[in-house]
Amino acid sequence: MPSIRLLSPRLANQIAAGEVVERPASVVKELVENALDAGADRVEIEVEQGGVKLIRVRDDGSGIAESDLPLALSRHATSKIASLDDLEAVASLGFRGEALASISSVSRLTLTSRTDQQEAASRVEVEGRDMDARISPAAHPVGTTVEVRDLFFNTPARRKFLRTEKTEFNHVEECVRRQALSRFDAGFTLRHNQKVVQNLRSAESMLDKERRIGALCGQKFIDNAVVIDAEATGLRLWGWVALPTFSRSQADLQYFFVNGRVIRDRLVAHAVRQAYRDVLYNNRHPAFVLYLEVDPATVDVNVHPTKHEVRFRDGRLVHDFIFRTLHKALADVRPDDHFRGAVAQSFGRETAEQGSPQADGVAPSQAYPQSGQSTAPWFGGQTPSPAEGFRGQAAPQQEWRASDQMAFYQSLGGGGVSTRQEPASFSGAAVMPSDQSAAADSSEEPPLGYAIAQLHGIYVLAQSSAGMIVVDMHAAHERITYERMKRALAEQDLKSQPLLVPLSLAVSQKEAALAETHSEELQHLGLQVERIGPETLAIRQVPALLRGADTEQLVRDVLSDLIEHGQSDRVEAVTHELLGTMACHGSVRANRQLTIPEMNSLLRDMEATERSGQCNHGRPTWTLVTLAELDKLFLRGR
């Protein structure tokens, strides 16, 4: 075996560069983070050939003193931490002191800087096997410029792994997008091959922040997003979450920041998925730009060299806070929140910001009515309250006291529709009498307007000042019934049912110990699980509603969640899935003729029901066809 010897500084730095410098985007990330840590108000990034030929990052930050320049390109040299206490409460983006040394070992790097206390700037370069620093005078304003040329020129094997110029620049652009989303108080300019790609001014007001997000994430995202801002137990979560109708086929529009640092974390991803669980269709992905502010001492950012991962001291607290905040925000979404995105896309962003289409004399109060503030008379001569059911009668929420599936289902009365009068019909459509048309023109109309017809026994057509609203009556009633069943279940304890013959389950020692430790928590979920051997569990009780489910798989899934996330919502998820199926079968079916009062009662229930924009399976329950879209169909105004 060869004798042990000390690596040369350049080779040591090149090894470290293998972790820090993966591609040009990695260089941009490290340099921009340094600029932001220096207090820059403006950061300019210029790249050529996707960053392989040139990366130049200039900032107007505090700069680096001439006496500190020799250390600036040395390994483990930093101004951001000085002790273990600093490391355990890192507030800056960078802190390792490895980035500049690693980058300079695989490129031709020049750093020019000046502080406000210096009359002239200085430039530093490193060269040779020992990477000796060479300092020379230079002309430069207060701030710092770092030039990185010919990336990986001395490590050709690394250069072979780079992709095409377009692909590498896309990664650079994504990196700048993340940094621009993390710091609204700084301006950013990105140039590629002497062409300006992004030019973002600092954003202080909420409107300016939304404009930046619109420029970086697409205007449709901000038009279909809900603003959230919540604080609890030393945590603050704020930002924008997209409506469930604005879902994505892949997770390409998800940005999460912890104290200004963009991260990818499984705990956060699980909390978001859980919040969107029953409002997304199939395998669609939510879109969001969220910011979590926590005490730096409660989060460990020294987990990975790229600093993309963090570890929370109390992960369960963070998970619950994120889930509950997003869950409430999505539950509070009402039809008028969906109108903003639809109207903005039809009439343009400028009119949407003014609050109305401003077309054909529509007033702002007509275009964006406030949810829950309708005072217009109902077509039955009265305004139904949120507690009124789809039948136009009070929903029997307090009378629901079910102990098993059948009793629970029967207590809902089947969820059908009782017809009080024969509907008027015209080729299968129920038509609104003409003497009620004046009510639809009320300036205080409800968000979903007033029903005018039923199409093919499937869709309810409603008229509002914004245009025509088409409602899938089965999907809408399915969500209404489902939410009522969830509320009824929440008002009772989750009842357990003993198994006549306990079920023996073979597990690993880790799973058996976990079940023993979390026995009280499992009991709260309706599961009585006992450890009867080193690798054997006995299941003695299961939730009454889930007695027909695969008990063995359910317990295994719960244990898996406890291992990975420290908690499990598996029982709740399976229970809600069952309630969703019951609500689907108990909702009004196609070809059922409804009266105008019944249709309006459905619309009012939708406006008062959580998550009424989607059915239990994530399908949309209604859509808006604006007047502008109708005018385009008939070439009006041309």
Image (cartoon, rainbow, N blue to C red):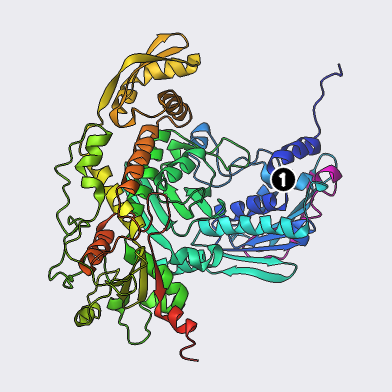
Instruction: Identify which residue, 386 or 67, lies in the foreground.
Output: 386
Instruction: Please name the residue shown 21% across and 35% down the image.
Output: 402
Taking the magenta stretch, the answer to whether it contains residue 144 is yes
Q: Residue at x 64, y 50 (%)?
A: 30
Q: Residue furthest bottom?
A: 638
- Looking at this view, is 79 or 249 the one in front? 249
The amino acid type found where label 1 is placed reads: Glu
Q: Is residue 200 above or below residue 317?
A: below
Instruction: Estimate the x, y position of residue 112 in percent, counting from the top left.
Output: 71, 58
Q: Is residue 114 visible?
A: no
Q: Quadrant of the N terminus?
A: top right
Badge 1 is on which residue?
Answer: 22
Q: List the single residue furthest toward the top.
A: 533
Residue 497 is situated, as x and y percent measured from the top left of the image, at 27, 23
Query: Can you give x and y, in whole percent of width and height, for residue 414 in the image?
Result: 24, 46
Residue 519 is left or right of residue 193, and the answer is: left
The total number of labels drawn is 1
Q: Residue at x 43, y 64 (%)?
A: 224
Q: Determine crowd level at label 1: few under 14, some 14-19, many 20+ residues with C-alpha closer than 10 A.
A: some
User: Is residue 542 or residue 124 the one in the foreground?
Assistant: 542
Question: Is residue 502 visible from the viewing direction of this image?
Answer: yes
Secondary structure of the residue carrying numbered label 1: loop
Q: Is residue 564 above or below residue 247?
A: above
Magenta-highlighted residues: 132-158
